[in-house]
Image (cartoon, grey):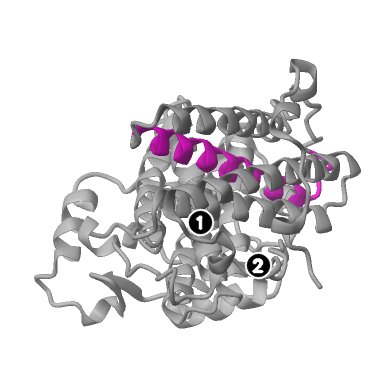
Amino acid sequence: MGFNPLQEKGIPIDRQFRNWSELNVKPYDKNSVDPYTQCRVITMNGIEVEAVMFSHQFARHTTDLDLKRQLALVRRAEQQQQKAVCWLVPGEASNLETVIGYEQVAVDLTAWVAQNEPNPYARQAYEFGLLEDFDHLYRYANLMDMLEGKKAEKIVKGLTEITPGRPTIAEHRHPMDDVRKPLDRNKDDPRSLLHALTITAAEQQTMNYYMNIGNRPTEPMARGLYLEIAQIEEQHVTHYESLLDAGASWAEMLVLHEYNECYLYYSFMQQEPDPRIRQIWELHLAMEIEHLRIACELMRQTDKKDPEAMLPKELPEAVTFQSNKEYVRQVLGSQINLTANETEFVPVETLAPDHRYFAYQRVVNGHGPVPSEQVIDKHVKAKGREYRLEVIGPSPVEEFRKAG
């Protein structure tokens, strides 16, 4: 029998609070950290931020003061978890070095989810977004090489390739075409609900990060690239969050959030090679087991439903950071020309000339240089060619095989 957090005993909530020295953890070494340790840290920071923000939204939508107090109690522990995880990221890492980690998360986490997603429509949604984050990694890697003289391969360590994906310039769609069909918590596999929560939180973190640090560079080209990709990350949050079943009650959504945190901490605990960081995952799992218990009790009281009826009997297969180079190439070779028309994914060449996609493209890309294209053009002019890390071989997309 696998691990079932509903049957485990966690740390009582009144014993979960930590002092400043416990939270002000020693960062990992940016030069020696395992790339996927960094990815796990980035992912769990995003998951904890989502937990905190969801709890705040829940509190803003209830008049029950006792419920507000219960949410505040658990939320304080979640806030401390977020701080302990986020403070693992070293201050010595530049914003661009951190961004490379963010985009490696977006590629390899989304690729794993897509390959393990039981709902065909949701799987297509993940593959669609995957190719766009793959291109963002390529653009930022070229920017970092130019501005800081640093190679992204030192961060991704050959586990994730760096080569063009669906060009960022083509990713700008009319807002109405970024909304997807929702999952159904009563019909879909629980894994699908957990996957959607995970990727929404990860993309939301990236969106928030760019919203806040995108204005920090002094170089206009860098500011432009952050600006452009930050817009796409907002599109991605719309894209993924619309997969969530909005018909769920607040209590049901809280249970799913807490269960998903248990799932991810347990998954990453199994894989983490750094003993010190693995201890953090273990501690946080014990805390989340208690948070889940509290959420389940709330659901029983408010909804008069049994939470176990909507949850797996045991945790699904562990979420795994692994190299997905072959899979990404397969998706790249077969889906490079897709865009969206309402909730469907279609070849861009099938859109009517008067489709809103082209009108929106003319607005955002119609005047002056497009930053994502400008970065590559300037890299070619400065260094003779673009920066790529094609570990397996030339791009599967013929038009991308000729380097700039």
**Which span is picked out in magenta?**
31-60
Instruction: Give residue 351's position: percent from left, percent from top.
Output: 19, 77
Residue 141 visible? The answer is: no
Which residue is rendered at x = 56% and y = 35% of the image? Answer: 147
Q: Is residue 39 magenta?
A: yes
Does the residue at mark 2 contact the one at mark 1 (Cβ under 8 Å)? Answer: no
Specify the quadrant that holds the N terminus. Answer: bottom right
Which quarter of the picture shows residue 117? Answer: bottom right
Instruction: From the image, tell me which residue sits under label 1.
Output: 197
**Can you tell which mark lies on residue 390?**
2
Does residue 228 sit above or below 57 in this rendering?
A: below
Q: Is residue 204 left or right of residue 387?
A: left
Of residues 234 and 283, the one nearer the viewer is 283
Which quarter of the picture shows residue 18? Answer: top right
Packing grade of label 1 (10 A; few <14, some 14-19, many >=20) is: many
- Distance from Cα at disc 2 to Cα at disc 1: 31 Å
